Amino acid sequence: QLVESGGGLVQAGGSLRLSCTASGRTFSGYAMGWFRQAPGKDREFVTSTSPSSSTTYSADTVKGRFTISRDNAKNTVYLQMNNLQPEDTAVYYCAAGLGGTSSQSYFYWGQGTQVTVSS
């Protein structure tokens, strides 16, 4: 089970850090990713990291602003989001799986946490 936390309401230009903690099993052998879904839009890839954190991928829309990291000892992955903009408003989901940018490569999903950025 994956449980996200840290979402909320923030003004444009602000920061948030999302956490995703796994329980019931270890996810240290899986790639971890963050996806988001805005109202009326499809779920989209945000960023991912390999099991050892040696490789990360990020969508162009968040490069330079969002950073993914993981602490395998704590079974937790983080998403540091800086310089948030209204277009970042969405429900953010963490996922565990094979990695990459496709949601179909991920087998385990959290329930999501809402991020709202006001202008």
Image: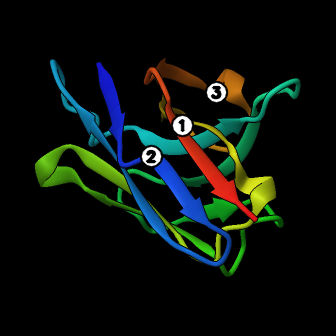
Question: Where does residue 107 sit, x and y in percent of width and height?
Answer: 51, 18
Would you place residue 70 above or below residue 64 in this image?
above
| Residue located beneath label 3 in the image | 105
> Distance of mark 1 from mark 2, alpha carbons?
5 Å
Q: What residue type is labelled 1?
A: Gln
- Residue 74 is left or right of residue 3, and the answer is left
Residue at point 77% right, 35% down?
Answer: 38
Are the two marked residues, 1 and 2, in contact with CB atoms closer than 8 angstroms? yes
Q: Which of marks 1 and 3 is in front?
A: 1
Instruction: Read off the residue under disc 2.
Output: 7
Q: Give the mark nearer the N terminus: 2 vs 3.
A: 2
Nearer the N terminus, badge 1 or badge 2? 2
Q: Identify residue for label 1.
A: 114
Say above or below: 83 vs 87: below
| Tag 1 and tag 3, C-beta contact below 8 Å | no
- Label drawn at residue 68: none
Q: Residue at x 74, y 66 (%)?
A: 85
**Looking at the picture, which amino acid does disc 3 mark?**
Ser
Q: Is residue 25 left or right of residue 86?
A: left
